[in-house]
Amino acid sequence: MNRAKDWLAQARKDIEAAKDMMADGHYEWACFICQQSGEKALKSVAFAFNSEIWGHNLTTLLRALSDRMDII
């Protein structure tokens, strides 16, 4: 099982769902799903580098990643 690939695959599926929500005029749901996708993508990066990050705030997650690796 590759956790990084699993998280990234789900992030991509979330983006597709957000596109559907946008097309149907459900903008608030599209925004929520995009945030979820970003969270999963960042967690995917963490798993790819044998790390783990917790939380839901994208800025906080990105900072936690940057503490572990040179990304910003």
Image (cartoon, rainbow, N blue to C red):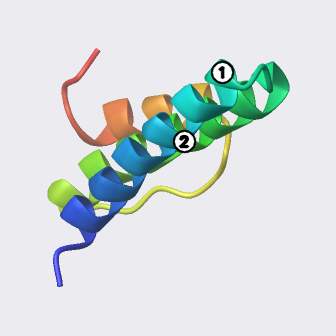
Q: Residue at x 30, y 51 (%)?
A: 8
Above or below, 71 against 51 in this view is above
- Quadrant where the C terminus sits is top left
The mark tally for this picture is: 2
Where residue 60 appears, as percent x and y from the top left, is 59, 33
Query: Horizontal and vertical percent for residue 43?
Result: 40, 52
Which numbered disc flags the more N-terminal residue, 2 or 1? 2
| Outermost residue toward the bottom in this view | 1
Residue 14 in the figure: left or right of residue 1: right
Q: Up-down: is 33 above or below 48?
A: above
Q: Distance of mark 2 from mark 1, alpha carbons?
A: 9 Å
Work out which quarter of the rendered image holds the N terminus and state it.
bottom left
Q: 53 or 24: which is nearer to us? A: 24
Q: Residue at x 80, y 26 (%)?
A: 26
Task: Give SS at disc 1.
Answer: helix
Quarter assignment of residue 18: top right
Q: Position of residue 27 (x, y in %)?
A: 78, 20
**Image disc number at residue 32:** none
Q: Which residue is mark 1?
A: 22
Q: Residues within 10 Å of mark 1 (few under 14, many from 20)?
A: some
Residue 62 left/right relative to 18: left
Looking at the image, which is closer to me, 15 or 37? 15
> Residue at coordinates 60% horizontally, 43% vertically from top-left?
36
> SS for tag 2?
helix
60 relative to 59, above or below: below
| Residue furthest front as drawn | 24
Q: Residues within 10 Å of mark 2 (few under 14, many from 20)?
A: some
Mark 1 residue type = Met
Residue at mark 2: 17
